[in-house]
Amino acid sequence: MQLTLTKSSERWLLLTLALIQFTHIVDFMILMPLGPQLMRLFHISPREFGFLVSAYTFSAGISGFLSAFVVDRFDRKKILLWLYAGFTLGTLACALAPSYPVLMAARILTGCFGGVLAAAVLAVVADAIPMERRGAAMGIVTSAFSAASVLGVPLGLYLASLFDWHAPFIFLTGVSLLVFGLILKGVPALRTHLNIPQRNNPLQVLGSVLKSPPQLWALLFTVFMMIGQFAIIPFLSPSMVANVGFSEAQLTLIYLLGGAVTLITGPLIGRMADRYGKLKILSLFLVLAVVPQLWITHLGPTALPLALLLTTSFFIVSGGRMIPAMALITGTVEPQRRGSFMSIQSSVQQLSAGAASLFAGMIVVKDAQGHLLHYGVIGWIAAITSLLCIAMAPMLLKKPTPVTSPEFQTQPQSPQADLS
């Protein structure tokens, strides 16, 4: 039986979840533009800075996988509170870090909690919001990425320029304390999934996923989606400077404009998915994604307005395809296993993003003039993965595999809403 919320309670819930997403996304994103300061102050190489960035992603992926074995044993609200407390502590540790090794340890700690937060938020949305409104709800929650781009990162850089690199993390710690209070007030207790007796061990959790074709397709779909996105993103800004002709100061325009526009388009795409069908909207945006993926990666010297139009379109379609995709993915698993599966899905997402970035770094090289070479190869790989995702997307419509083992005795379920 799904929780029934009033309109006011549902708005508060979605606002709180969006703020959770906003803070942990800003925490992840803000480190990258702080690279020049950190390399200068800590006397580290670009390679060592790369380890600092990837430490968050890989620790998030590992912790997400491990959390899958326990996350469905607890009230969703309690899980959120514990995870967000750990995330806030990690962010404070980053703010106070005096050296590169300490900052590395703090990033690993923050990633352990921040990576699982995303899965916990999606599980809450799926448990609290009916499928017929879940696309719009996902649009609101995922708009946090846009808000992080247009508000969080520029504000963090401004604070760093006024004070030093510690300032963004100190500010983010303060905001996180306020969001913790909102979780206490705005997130209801979600225990429906606990009504079904569970004595699952790690092998049973993994076995339930391996025995479910819809969930296996959802994980494979996630891998290809991340390749199509995170093979391109790490070199987006460097290519705009080296190949297109942007100044470093103009790079801020990419995030300001892209974030501002997707703040509007994200909720609209979510409502379109609810109205016209999540599979149709997902397929549409997977096709549309191919255009900026190929164009941006093959771009040479270009006028600023056209280049910004292309980068903004990349933001729109990349974020736009994730909204119906996540709504469909949450529907491939039954409520009593949703937290575990979404933790595994989040782990796969994080690890795929990190692997895609490393893979792209092995292909893209710099010539004697400073231009990036072979970025176009990355574009073709991303475009092919988008087309493969179109072929896989219908598999996400299959109903969850019924839980028949003694450890997962289920009660009669209401007919699944039409996802198509």
Image (cartoon, rainbow, N blue to C red):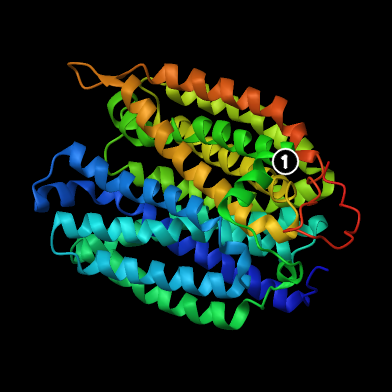
Residue drawn at x 72%, y 78% is 8
Above or below 124: residue 310: above
- Residue, far front: 406
**Image label count:** 1
Q: Is residue 192 visible?
A: yes
Q: Amino acid at mark 1?
A: Ser
Tell whether 410 sits left or right of 82.
right
On-image quarter of the N terminus: bottom right
Residue drawn at x 50%, y 31% is 227
Q: Residues within 10 Å of mark 1 (few under 14, many from 20)?
A: some
Residue drawn at x 46%, y 44% is 350
Give residue 228's position: percent from left, percent from top: 52, 30
Tell whether 315 sits left or right of 173.
right
Tell whether 250 sits left or right of 96.
right
Q: Secondary structure at mark 1?
A: loop
Residue drawn at x 29%, y 64% is 168
Q: State the image quarter where residue 23 is shown.
A: bottom left
Q: Which residue is mark 1?
A: 212
Give residue 84's position: percent from left, percent from top: 46, 70
